[in-house]
Image (cartoon, helix red, strand yellow):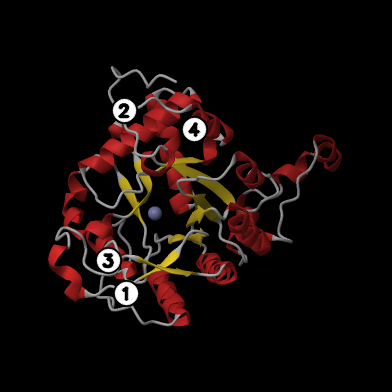
Amino acid sequence: MPPQDQSEPFPWHLGVYDAHCHPTDTMTSIRSIPSMRTKCLTVMGTRAQDQALVAEVADTHGVKSGDPGKWPSDEYPTPFSKFLAQTGDRLERYPYALVGEIGLDRSFRIPFPWRPEEGPDRDESLTPGGREGRRLTAFRCNQKHQKAIYKKQLQLAAEYRRAVSIHGVQAHGMVYDALKELWQGHEKEILSKRELKRRGADHQTAKDGVEAEEEDLKPRPYPPRICLHSYSGGSAHLNSYFNPAIPVDIFVSFSTAINLGDALENETPESFVEMIKTVPDHRLLVESDLHTAGEEMDRRLEDIVKRVCGAKGWGLEEGVERLGKNWRRFAFGTDG
Ligand SMILES: [Zn+2]
C-alpha cells in the first residue's frame, strides 16, 4: 500500500494523542514535552521505580489533578502487596491516572541487579536505575505467577475504575483468559432484532439518563476500559475481544516501533493493513512506545497515524479526529 498523499499538511491542530510511551526512561527528554506537537502523552511505568517519575511528570506537565507532593522513589525492595497499595494511593491522588503498563510476557527473563558502580560507560542521558539495559539472567518468571500479579493489577484498576494499558508477548491467550475470568458472569445481554422488537422500543431506551449513570457507578470486578498496546498477536485472538457481550470497552493501539519494526519511510506491509482493518474504527489508538520525548516521538506518531489512515481509507483530518475521540474515550471514559 502506498504511503498517504504527502502534500496534505499533517493536522496536528486537531490533537494527536500518544496512547503509550515511556519518556521517563529518559528524564532529560521530559523538558521537551511542552514543545512537542503531540497533544497528550499516556506515560507508562514498567518498574516500581517508574511510578515516582511518572507522578513527577504529571505534576509538571500533567492534565491537572490533585495537589503535587513528593513520592518515595526508593521502591526496589518493596513487597508486592505494599507496592499495590501504593499504586492505589497514587490512583486516588491522580484521578486521570491509568494503570499500566501491565501484562504477561512469556519471553521475560529476570535481569541481573543494577549496580551503580558499573557505571563508567553508562549513557548519561538515560534515567539512572534499573531501566538501564541490564544483562539478563537465565531465570524466567513462571506463567502462573505472572498471571496472578497481572490479575491483581487488573482488579486494582477495576476498583478505581481506571483504564489499563496491556502488554502481551507470546501470551495473548493468557492475557485474554485472565480478563475473561474477571468479567465472567457480567457479560452484556445481546438481544436479537426480533427479541428487541418483542420487548418493545422501551427496553432499548430504558437504560438512558440517570439509570445509566447509576449503573456506571456500580462496583465491577473488571476494568472499564483496556488498551492492547502495540498489539502483536494474531487476528483470531483479537476477534475474541470484539464480542459485543464483553462488558469492557476494548481498544487496540499500534506503533511504528513495535508493529513495523521501526521501518519509517517504508511501504506498509499488507499484513499490517489487514490487521488494522480487523479493528473496528472506534477501537483504534496510536502510540509511539518510545523511551524519549521530543521530535522523534512526534515523527513516529505522524507516521503511524498516516499508515492507519491509509489502511482505513480515512483522510488525515478525519483519521486524526477519530483517533483523538477514541483516545479521550479510552483515557477519560468519555470523548466529549
Ligand atoms: Zn511499553
> Which of the marked residues, 4 or 1, is nearer the chain's N terminus?
1
Numbered tag placed on residue 265 in the rendering: 2
Q: Amino acid at mark 2?
A: Glu
Left or right: where 32 falls relative to 58: left
Residue at 40% from the left image edge and 44% from the top image edge: 258
> Which of the marked residues, 4 or 3, is nearer the chain's N terminus?
3
Give the SS element for disc 1: loop
Quadrant of image for the N terminus = top left
Q: State which mark lies toward you, 4 or 3.
A: 4
> Which of the marked residues, 3 or 2, is nearer the chain's N terminus?
3
Read off the residue under disc 3: 53
Q: Amino acid at mark 3?
A: Leu
Read off the residue under disc 4: 272
Q: Amino acid at mark 1?
A: Pro
Numbered tag placed on residue 113 in the rendering: 1
Q: Position of residue 276 (x, y in %)?
A: 51, 33
